[in-house]
Amino acid sequence: MIIKKFQANTETEAIMLAREELGRDAIVMNIKTISPKGIYKLFRKPVVEITAAVDDNINYKTEKPKSVNSPVQAKKQVPGIIYDETEDIAQDTVKGTEDADAAPSVIEKKLNDLQNLLVKQLSEKEAAEKSEDKEVSNKSLACIRLIYNQLVDNEVDEKYANQIISEIEGTLKKDASMDNILAAVYQKLILKLGQPKTIELNGKTPKFIFVIGPTGVGKTTTIAKIASKFKVEEKARVAFVTADTYRIAAVEQLRTYANILGVPLKVIYSEEEIKQARDDFSDYDIVFVDTAGRSHRNKEHRDDVELLINAIPREERETYLVLSATTKYRDLIKITEVYKEIADYNLIFTKLDETSCIGNLFNIRMLTDAPLSYATFGQNVPDDIARIDAQSIAKQLLRGQ
């Protein structure tokens, strides 16, 4: 006996398929509606399946039944029975179904086994793809962790390192290469460091540059370096004012630089005297004011510096806080907080040549939101100074020590 299954969108179409292939002697053993299982349900609609059989001694390929006259006639037939002129198949349906109950169950089992095999293979493929995705994700994570550790090793505060990593993760593809991740961090560092804020001349009125900061950071030498560039390169008219009368030989140190550059120097002790200096140097382009370098914990000193700064109109002055790159981050936090109470400032970092880690430049920039300006890297006047280069700083932060 030959047993076959036929599937179509409707019962009528399935019966017609069976008659066309098996011939008039075929008997219908079973009719059922099949709903796709597993992932197939996403792509297929339910179909009608009939199980038909014919004696294998009959040449069913050469004996063709007459076709159903019309869809209307087919719809009037009883479901489960194939009709023709002699109605032979209709009379044999019930008997044939009883004799062949076992056969379709075996075929259905094999078909189900095949479907299960396909589902298993697809599941294995999905699992392999997930494993591959996980491997890519692990590589990206390892790369990000490496960069994070590099930032922290260069003394970038963990809070800011985490912030950078968090911000770039949302912009990266899941299969981003190490070069792409590194480039994203590099660009993020540059954006956060910002453009340097350097001194520019007013043109008509003198600009007063107040240089503040704790003792020992190199304020006086920094003034000499910047003033030299304006004097030599821009041919600017430069003057010095010093209020640092507390430190031994501080006035003499600045006087030495003034004599070398050929610029005037005025020593002051109060805000009234700096107002007088403003009048005295009204024809100059730029006036550098060296303040006393005492402990930031000294409130009296802080008040004196604030009075000096406020004696000059805001539009005529700029303030630069000088910090040493070798100072501990915890101390830098305290210093910047104290001087923020005195005036808004730009940041100058000194002694970059004395440290291998420059994470504090980034930390203080992030903490204060104050613009970076200059950096010094030696005692030579006027050579060992330059405006801070965000690209150079970013490269150093990502580079090993």
Image (spheres, grey):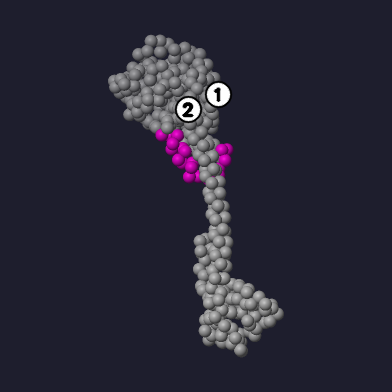
SS class, disc 2: helix
Estimate the spatial distance between the alpha carbons at disc 1 and disc 2, rounded to whole Å.
39 Å
- List x then y, in percent, for residue 13: 58, 78
Amino acid type of the residue tagged 2 in the rendering:
Asp
Q: Quadrant of the N terminus?
A: bottom right
Residue 174, position as x, y percentages in the image: 53, 45
Residue pictured at 50% horizontal, 22% vertical: 356
- Whether residue 354 is visible, yes or no, is yes
The kind of residue tagged 1 is Glu
Q: In x, y percent, where is residue 36? A: 52, 66
From the viewer's perspective, tell me whether residue 121 is left or right of residue 224.
right
- Which of the 4 image quarters holds residue 96? bottom right
| Left or right position of 34 against 330 | right
Q: Which residue is mark 2?
A: 153
Looking at the image, residue 344 lies above or below residue 253: below
- Write the start and end of the magenta stretch as one range: 159-179
Q: Residue at x 53, y 86 (%)?
A: 76
Which residue is denoted by mark 1 in the rendering?
A: 233
